[in-house]
Structures are given as structure tokens and as C-alpha cells.
Amino acid sequence: MIDTHTHLGQLVFDNPGLTPAKLLRWMDRHGIEKAVVMAVEVPEELDFFVTTKELLKMTKSHRDRLLPLCAVDPRHRYPGRFDPHPIIAHHMDQGCVGYGENLCGLPVDDPMQQRVYEACDRLKLAIVMHLDAWINRDRPGLPGFEQMLATYKNVRFIGHSPHFWKEISADPPEDVSYPKGPVTPGGRLDALFDKYPNLYADLSAGSGYGAITRDPEFGLAFLKRRKDRLMFATDYLRVGQQTPIIDHLRNAGLSKDAFERITRRNAEKVFRL
């Protein structure tokens, strides 16, 4: 199994976070061979940064199992003067396998954000996208995100977090980040998956796990229907964190093909491992 969304280092004041050794021990206990690890270079969601340079250093001795992503804050310098391409290209040369986590507190289609997408498009990278009410914010139905999917076709966009996953249903409530109960068929996610081959999604955290378990029958059908676009992920970032997605996928009743695609093969394709 390849976990496509994990973290290292101290991210919040009241928890020391994970060292590489702690993350690897947890992976061994759960039968996870490799993990994609996020960089955090913006201040919006968390207390501290874990920069790409720090992440490259922490994972250097474990690149057979811990696969770092890179990130930049698109608000560097004066608007329009920052070119992230050489920085991202350098990070890739140093061993990163993609871009993430995109946690910037701007609209998802802001021009400063698009400089990052342009760079990743030139480099043909995957980007892990967190979408909520402030980070990568968008209107209901994700029209801004859809425009980015249509514009930057060489980017493999990986949807994640509450305002992405609540669009699994055709009637997502605007004021609820983690909806409960039955899913109404015809949600925007199915439409976006049908239209854009560069859209993927990770099943991490309460948002991904909740989306496929709130309506078990719909969730299982969704896993089977989108087996070529979904990736196993936990968002594991602290000791003792619950990660029910692991057992859920193992016990969901997926075919061997669907299970292998979701837990490994899609990650190998998306991150070119």
C-alpha cells in the first residue's frame, strides 16, 4: 500500500508531530510500504511550517519509503513578480515527487495561484489540493477549480478536504463542511471525473473517509466506479491518530483489481514512482 497523504515534523503547538522513525513504525504496523509526505509553506491552517528543504532533509535517508512533495507560497514578492518554476524544478531535482500540500488562503483560481499551476503544468506534476471555506476557496459546484482543471491539463490535480468531498452529493449544504447521511446521486465530483482525466482524489482525513462511508451503498459503488481516480491516503500527522480508512478499504468488498488500483497503482501513476 502507498499512503498518498502524510506529514512529518511539528505542525501544531501542542503536539510534537512525527519523526521519520515514528512514521515508519506506524507504516510497518499497518502494512504500508511507502508514504507521500506533504510540505507546509503557508500559514493558513497550521501553527508551524515544515518547509520543502526541511522535508528533503528529514526524508533523505528513507527515500525508498518516504516520498517528499514540495511547496511554495505563491504570495512571495510583489504580485506578478514571483516565478515559482525554477524553485519547484529545483525541488524536483532534489528528490520531490510532486507538489503539495496546496494550503494557500486564496481563491483556487487566483492569478498568483495560477503561477504555481503554470509551473506544475510545464513540469507535468501532481498537486495535492486542499479546498475549504478559506483555503483554495471556491463557489458551490467548484466552478473555479473546474476552470483550473480545464486550463492546466498537464497537472494531475488531487482533490482533498471538506469542500471538495462534500460535492460527492448533488445537494451539498453550503454551511456544513462534513455532511452526514445519504448521498444524492448526480454530484459534481462524478461530473468532474467524467469530464477531466487529470482529476484524482485522495481518501484521507474525515472528509474523504466520511464521503465514502456516510452512505455505505453509494460509497462502495463510488469506489468501484472511480477505482482509476481514487488513492488511499490518511493525512496521518500525529501519534495515536485514528485512520479508519485503512480497515475500511481492506474490508469494503472491493475486487483485487480495484483494491490494488486505489491502494497502490494509481499512486504510482500519478506521482510517477
Image (cartoon, helix red, strand yellow):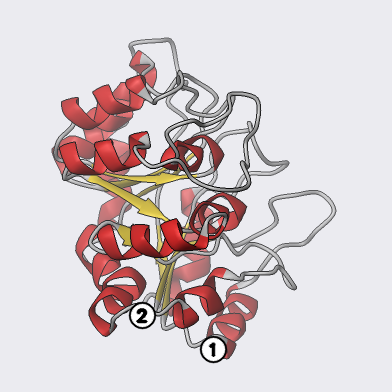
Q: Where, by quadrant of the figure, is residue 10 drawn? A: bottom right
Q: Nearer the viewer, mark 1 or mark 2?
A: 1
The picture places residue 95, in percent across and down from the top left corner, at: 31, 62
Regarding mark 1 in the picture, which secondary structure is present there?
Answer: helix
Determine which residue is flagged by label 1: 28
Q: Where, by quadrant of the figure, is residue 139 drawn? A: top left
- Residue 83 visible in the snapshot: no
Disc number placed over residue 64 in the picture, else none: 2
Q: Give left or right: position of 69 versus 206.
A: left
Which residue type carries mark 1? Asp
Label 2 Cα crowd, 10 Å radius (few <14 / some 14-19 / many 20+): few
The picture places residue 145, in percent across and down from the top left corner, at: 34, 27
- Mark 1 and mark 2: Cα distance apart in space: 14 Å
Asked if disc 1 and disc 2 are in contact, CB closer than 8 Å, the reply is no
* Total numbered badges shown on the rendered structure: 2
The picture places residue 261, in percent across and down from the top left corner, at: 26, 72
Q: Pick whichever, 173 or 36, lies toward us.
A: 173
Query: Going 23% across and 32% down the picture, which residue do you hit?
Result: 149
